[in-house]
Image (cartoon, helix red, strand yellow):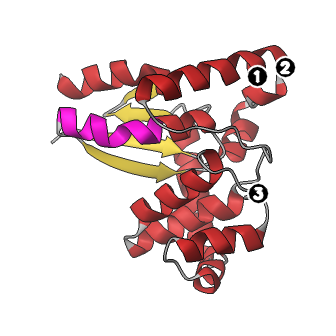
Amino acid sequence: MKRLEFFFDFGSPTTYLAHTQMPVLARRTGAEIVYRPMLLGGVFKATGNQSPAVIPAKSKWMGRDMQAFARRYGVPFKYNPNFPINTMMLMRGAVAMEKEGRLAPYVDAIFHAMWVEPQNMNDPQVIGGVLAKAGFEPKAMLAAIEDQSVKDGLRANTEEAVSRGVFGAPTFFVGEKMFFGQDRLDFVEEALRQ
């Protein structure tokens, strides 16, 4: 079975758009989709890259582009007015939920709160409410994200991503072939079919 590694961070709206297409891609190719949480801020720092949102002309263009992709995919998308969001807690949560085998529902809940019904995911109380609504125990999650093995896991994923050439999100790997951006999913699908 082909394997698709999906390096992601919740702070990227294009990563949300890619996430909405993972079930479709898995169905069409039979590939196993493996979500790899990383800290995009750490990737930017290590590579000298920066968010397109800080470049006004690019940000304006990307806003229209993301709406066009959301329409093409037939998925809801709303720009989060609280952007940028420090995703460290959220990404540690992803590592913690991966260890517990509950990554998929966690990812769905957080992406929904970021880019479908945008909430201020900088606020721990808001995060707690989102988690409780999705069936998670907020206090247990707060304890889990302070666990050293979770912190180390996120750091290791981020360092691995950078060492493999990642400079932004979303980034995909089919074997050693790297693809950047949700607008490259046709190339990803082609690689999975080879």
Packing grade of label 3 (10 A; few <14, some 14-19, many >=20) is: some
Amino acid type at image mark 3:
Asn
Residue found 61% across the figure and 64% down from its top: 92
Distance CA(mark 2)–CA(mark 3): 22 Å
Task: Please provide the residue range marked out in magenta.
Answer: 18-29
- What amino acid is at disc 1? Ser
Residue 160, label in figure = none
Q: SS for tag 2?
A: helix
Distance from disc 3 to disc 1, alpha carbons, whole Å, reads 20 Å
Q: Position of residue 175 (x, y in %)?
A: 30, 34
Residue 4 vertical placement versus 49 (above, below): below
Q: Quadrant of residue 57?
A: top right
Q: Judge whether residue 149 can be spotted in this image.
A: no
Residue situated in front as seen by the camera: 168 or 23: 23
C-alpha distance separating marks 2 and 1:
5 Å
Amino acid at pointer 2: Pro
> Mark 1 or mark 3, which is nearer the start of the sequence?
1
Which of discs 3 and 1 lies nearer the camera? The answer is 3
* Residue 95 locus on image (x, y percent): 52, 64
* Residue 96 against residue 193 in the figure, above or below: below
Please give the label number shown on residue 120. Answer: 3
Q: Give SS at disc 1.
A: helix
Q: Residue at x 62, y 55 (%)?
A: 113
Q: Which residue position holds label 2?
A: 56
The answer to whether marks 2 and 1 mark residues whose Cβ atoms lie closer than 8 Å is yes
| Front residue of 10 and 162 | 10
* Residue pointed to by mark 1: 59
Above/below status of 143 relative to 152: below
The reply to whether residue 175 is in sight is yes
Quadrant of the image occupied by residue 140: bottom right
Residue in front for this viewpoint, 153 or 11: 11
